[in-house]
Image (cartoon, coloured by chain):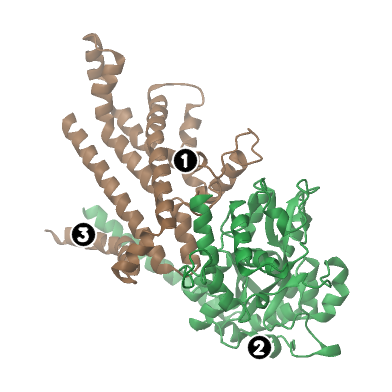
Chain colours: A green, B brown
Amino acid sequence: MRSFSSLIRGSIALGIAGALVLSPALLGEAGATTSTVNVVGYSVAGLGIRALEAAFQGTPAGANVTFNNTFGASDTMTTNVANGQAADFVNLSYSPNLTPLVGAGKVPANWATQELTVGGVNVNLTGNKQQTVYNTPGILTDSAVVFVVRQGNPLKIKNWADLVKPGVQIVTPNPTSSGSARWNLLAAYTAQIALKKTSHQAIDYLKKLLSNVVAQPTSGSLSMSAFVAGTGNVLLAYEDDAKAAIAAGNNIQFITPPQTMLIENPAALTTTGLTNPAAVAFYKYAFSKAGQVILAGLGYRPVLKSIATITASSFTNFTKKNSLLRVTDINKNGWTSANLQFFSPTVTFPAGNTTYPRFGIVTYLEQFVGSNG
Amino acid sequence: MSPVKGVARGAAVTFLSLVVLIPFAALITNAFNGGVSGFWSAVTAKESLHAIGLTFFCATLGSALNSAAGLATAWVLVRDRFWGQGLLNALIDLPFALPTVVAGVTLYALYGPLSPIHLSLTGTWIGITLAIMFVTLPFTVRAVQPVLETMTFTAQAAAATLGASPIRIFKTITLPALAPSLLAGTGLAFARAIGEYGSVVFISNNLPYKTELASSYIFSLTSSSQNTAASAVSLALLVVAMALLGLFSVLSYHFSRGNR
């Protein structure tokens, strides 16, 4: 027993000694000229953000800046930041993820206006002077939902109707943890509405689609990994992720369906980020022409009109009517409202109806398909 | 009580509280944030029951198979002498050292649709059980090995001279002596299997109501800010696991008493 307690005493002494030795080093680091920016992003954002960081470090403003990155499923990242994970710059899969961060006091409520105040990008310009492509404040990158298939498209997948044919095996992430999954399922639904289907028919379509799903990995990038590893024959994914996976040499190709959804990935400086000059400079860089050119080169659709114009040839254009849909096409209140309508954990039905929920449509369908399919 | 003893006990209790008890207390508090009814509805949600059921099924199967495989492995390592034995002995611990996500990715490549051995087990309970067996094998081997090493086998030899068959000797002498350590190893493997995430999340394909495991379901809940539900399901999982581990230690006690 004596030796045990002396061991404890010894370790405490060692711990104190260690702290004394280390503390000058820690203090010294805080006093140096290098500064750190904590970046938290959705899983698929990693590629673009890392490229932006590397380029930013090559500019005078970024020369002494180091980055501390965390990437993962968007909803998971949101929860972590809301619960206190250090973050100066957040890049999330979809705008509703900013709502809990505003609620937790981590991000200012007017985060979308940072694009103008910090980024110098004015989304309110119209006509010939239009500065951004889709005029949505606070959005760093645009993309679209696409179908990733095996090289040569052996199943001849062209449109949404092809996905619900028997034998088609779909991979799409789990909508409870992944923002990418939510974009995919909302795109499927909105496409049906654009194809003049009723809301009930669109829900029936989603049900068929979900019965063809063979894997729901926890994030968009893990879904890509599963697909590349041979699971399924169609993957619903971001256009940029598909381009990146093809560029990485995988034996796949992607198809832009005749109706797809505009994906808008927001970025914001947190309240701590706004007080960190390096983070502010990085935000500014990300929204600058130079930053947007880098993102465009990696397959993200640039938000600046000028860059979109010069990079137009590398993207499928959406000039046909109804080829590019938005969340507001099915829910005029946008994402926050659509999120409850489709992904609320609690399912509620309108009076006298037990098949087509008012809230939690996907939650209900997952349960229905899981229990009966 | 001597002052030294008191200090040591105080330090141990403080340490245990900081590392284990406080987090558990927080978990229990969180689980009941929505009251008893909130707890109950989170635990009995269909998706939750399904995930918990599949988790216990695969964990039980995996740890049971491992107790047999682990005993056989430990036996070979202790009782036999062969070339490469030292290397094999060292390899047993590797599943512990490997980050479980790496195990998950490796197993996905091995048993996935592009399996080099043409064995596609992803999205099946067999695949999940295999992954569990992979990460928990060291538990049973390492629990049984020291007991086997110190076993003298004189009783076995005596029984053999009296004409007992090898099977009878194993059943009546060897197994009862090994049972406590075997049960302890199996219990550890089982507990680990219940909470396993990294190695099984890929191979399961994570299909809700079908192949989604409890750990992954809880992860999804926390991701979508349903922390109370996540804590409730975790607590339910812990309670069932504790009950089963309790049963194991009762069995183990029974065996060790019978052995003396």
Q: Is residue B20 above or below residue B96?
A: below
Label 1 and label 2: CA atoms lie apart by 51 Å
Residue situated in front as seen by the camera: A12 or A322: A322
Question: In the image, what residue occupies the spot 71% across and 61% down?
Answer: A241
Q: Is residue A91 above or below residue A236?
A: below
Sort mark 1 into few (<14), some (14-19) or many (20+) by Cα contacts within 10 Å: many
> For the residue marked with disc 3, what is the amino acid?
Arg
> For the residue marked with disc 2, what is the amino acid?
Thr
For marks 1 and 3 on the same chain, the one whose residue lies earlier in the sequence: 3
Label 3 and label 2: CA atoms lie apart by 58 Å
Q: Quadrant of the C terminus of chain B?
A: top left
| Picture coordinates of residue B95, whole percent (x, y) | 49, 42
- SS at mark 1? helix
Chain for disc number 3: B
Disc 1 marks which residue?
B129
Disc 3 marks which residue?
B9
The reply to whether dot 1 and dot 2 touch (C-beta < 8 Å) is no
| Picture coordinates of residue A188, whole percent (x, y) | 66, 64
Q: Is residue A133 above or below residue B66?
A: below
Is label 3 or label 2 in front?
2
Residue A230 image-quadrant placement: top right
Chain for disc number 1: B
Disc 2 marks which residue?
A113
Residue situated in front as seen by the camera: B47 or A216: B47
Label 1 and label 3: CA atoms lie apart by 40 Å
In the rendered structure, the answer to whether residue A74 lies left or right of residue A48 reads left
Residue A33 in sight here: no
| Picture coordinates of residue B131, whole percent (x, y) | 50, 42
